[in-house]
Image (tube, rainbow, N blue to C red):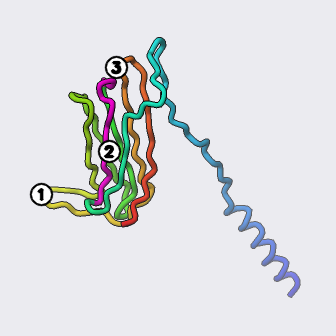
């Protein structure tokens, strides 16, 4: 009986060691803007803002100070309806302000279907300045619908 107990304990310990896998955490990524040499750096200027809209189940991005921008791009990524989802785009400014309404769902032939169980929503906006520098802003979004 003692031998069976001992063998059982050895099997449990060996199973534990064989099935355990080391886990390594990735370094956190910091998105920085990298100014080009001799580029004018304008401190404290904002080029975008984001606001969740529960009525339209979307995020509304407002772009400002576009007179200083050569190009601006955006990328929304999230997990919804059990899959990784996303939308992105870019604009070449023609005025001083603009906006985009990014829907948390899919549309086809005029029929829109919202995604459910939205998690890990992140919006990244990258502005390329006329002076040559870039500014990247990342938003973490937590929709309540």
Image quadrant in which you'd find residue 75: top left
| Alpha carbons under labels 1 and 2: distance apart | 22 Å
- Which numbered disc, 3 or 1, marks the residue that appears first in the sequence? 1
Q: Quadrant of the N terminus?
A: bottom right
Query: Which secondary structure lies at badge 3?
Result: loop
The reply to whether the magenta stretch includes residue 82 is: no
Q: Quadrant of residue 46?
A: top left
119 w.r.t. 6: above or below: above
Q: Which residues are magenta?
A: 57-70
1 or 2: mark nearer the eye: 2
Residue carrying label 2: 61
Among all residues in the image, which is located at the extreme left?
A: 109
Please tell me which of labels 2 and 3 falls first in the chain: 2
Mark 3, residue position: 130
Q: Residue 95 or 131: which is nearer the viewer?
A: 95
Q: Toward the viewer: 76 or 100?
A: 100
- Is there CB contact under 8 Å for labels 2 and 3? no
Contact (CB < 8 A) between labels 3 and 1? no
Q: Relative to 81, is 37 on the left or the right?
A: right
At which x and y percent is residue 26?
A: 60, 45
Closer to the chain start, of discs 1 and 2, is 2
Label 1 secondary element: loop
Tell me residue 57's x, y (percent).
Answer: 29, 60
- What residue is at 47 percent from the left and 31 percent from the top? 44
Position in image of residue 60 (x %, y %): 30, 49
Report crowding for label 3: few under 14, some 14 to 19, many 20 or more residues within 10 A (C-alpha): some
Q: Position of residue 133 (x, y in %)?
A: 42, 21
Q: Residue furthest top?
A: 38
Tell which tag, 3 or 1, sits nearer the viewer.
3
Question: Circle 1 is placed at which residue position?
Answer: 110
| Circle 2 SS class | strand
C-alpha gap between disc 3 and disc 1: 37 Å
């Amino acid at each position: 009986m003692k031998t069976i107990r001992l063998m059982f304990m050895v099997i449990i310990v060996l199973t534990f060691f064989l099935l355990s896998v080391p886990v390594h955490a990735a370094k956190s990524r910091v998105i920085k803007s990298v100014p080009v040499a001799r580029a004018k750096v304008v401190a404290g200027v904002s080029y975008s803002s984001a606001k969740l809209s529960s009525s339209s189940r979307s995020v509304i991005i407002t772009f400002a100070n576009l007179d200083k921008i050569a190009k601006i791009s955006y990328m929304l990524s999230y997990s919804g309806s059990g899959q990784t989802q996303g939308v992105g785009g870019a604009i070449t400014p023609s005025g001083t302000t603009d906006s985009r309404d990014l829907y948390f769902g899919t549309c086809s032939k005029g029929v829109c279907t919202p995604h459910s169980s939205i998690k890990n929503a992140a919006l990244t906006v990258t502005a390329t300045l006329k002076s040559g520098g870039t500014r990247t802003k990342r938003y973490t979004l937590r929709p309540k619908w």
